[in-house]
Amino acid sequence: MNRLNEFRKYYNHSIHPELRRLERQRIRLNLLFIGSAILIPIVIVLEIWINNLLITLLLAIPLFLYATWIYMRMKKFVRDYKPRVINRILDFIQKEVNYQDLYYNPTGKIAMETFLESRLFDPDIAIYQGEDFVSGKVGELDFKLCELNVEQNKPISGGTQKVFKGIFVSAVFNFDLEGAVLVWPRKYRQFFSKPIRTAVSYGAQNEDWEILYEPFRNTFVTYATPNTHVAGVLPITMQEAIIQYLAHIKRRDLLRQPADRPKQKPQVRALYLSILSNHIFVGLTEEKDMLEPNIFRSNLSFDLILEYYEQIQLMLKIIEDFDQMH
């Protein structure tokens, strides 16, 4: 709670002024857009009334250039919004002792090879898109994370189907753990039969019996390679922490539903986890793109900023807890 109060103060002093500057830009863009929406039909009617090819061209060229200029200004606004806001959020996170060297690249992404190294997903990928790459250190761990949208071809009906959409984290620690542990959401187990079969082909087997914390065992299915001490790699305190993280996100999603609209079921979150030698991978599904600015509606929202901060912080906290427990 103290950290949330600190973030609120930081938002008021450092992020809100930047949002105000961006809001003024957005309003100017809207005025230009409204002006063009009025001007363009008038010019078109005038061209039809004059019915002169030369005059039509003379009017059409500057009109086209004006519309293109407005479109490019809007694209620039969207392109510049996230770096100006996210870098300030990362500056706040980096004030904590355990976080260092945080770096943000709006167009970067984790390599597909790294994503597949997790062994959590089917390698038959048709679409692999990513953005909002963040890297740095959590304690002694080097990490990188980004938003990913991964799809594969449908085997029968054609088109594509979702494999994973959300935030994906990869971290490397400076010690080796014996064996490998892979964790899938139990509710969607049928969709991951292929990577589970692949894990079994490597010698992994179901180790749910080693998971003594019942809420974790009911939420996830756990596989591990032979001679892996699952309770040592994934201790019960870590299992409890992950369940608490998911419960917190669910409560947050419920609380942030608009009061003036009918209550909807919150999106179902799915968390994926694998620990392979000196590498840990965590994926958390998220249906919407985080912190995407709206051109035609105000972006002055503390809740919008807090949601992104908490999402990143929760993912890094899993990595941080894992580092401290080992």
Image: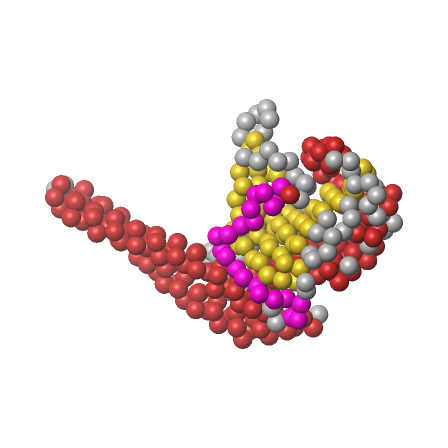
- Name the image quarter holding residue 203: top right
Between 97 and 155, the one nearer to me in the picture = 97
Task: Point out the residue furthest to the top here.
Answer: 156
- Left or right: residue 236 versus residue 139 is right
- Left or right: residue 191 versus residue 44 is right
Which percent across, then down, holds residue 46? 18, 47
Residue 213 falls within the magenta-colored stretch: no
Q: Quadrant of the C terminus?
A: bottom right
Rendered residue at 23%/45% (across/down):
44
Q: Quadrant of the N terminus?
A: bottom right
Please indicate, yes or no, whether residue 99 appears anywhere in the rendered image: yes
Between 208 and 32, the one nearer to me in the picture = 208
Which percent across, then down, holds residue 274? 71, 47
Which percent across, then down, holds residue 127? 53, 38
- Left or right: residue 221 versus residue 171 is right
67 to 163, vertically: above or below: below
48 to 257, vertically: above or below: above
Which percent across, then down, holds residue 235? 82, 54
111 to 106, vertically: above or below: above
Rendered residue at 43%/56% (across/down):
79
Give the magenta range: 96-116
Rendering colour mode? secondary structure
- Name the image quarter holding residue 252: bottom right
The count of marks equals: 0
Rendered residue at 26%/53% (across/down):
66
Rendered residue at 73%/60% (across/down):
323
- Left or right: residue 60 versus residue 157 is left
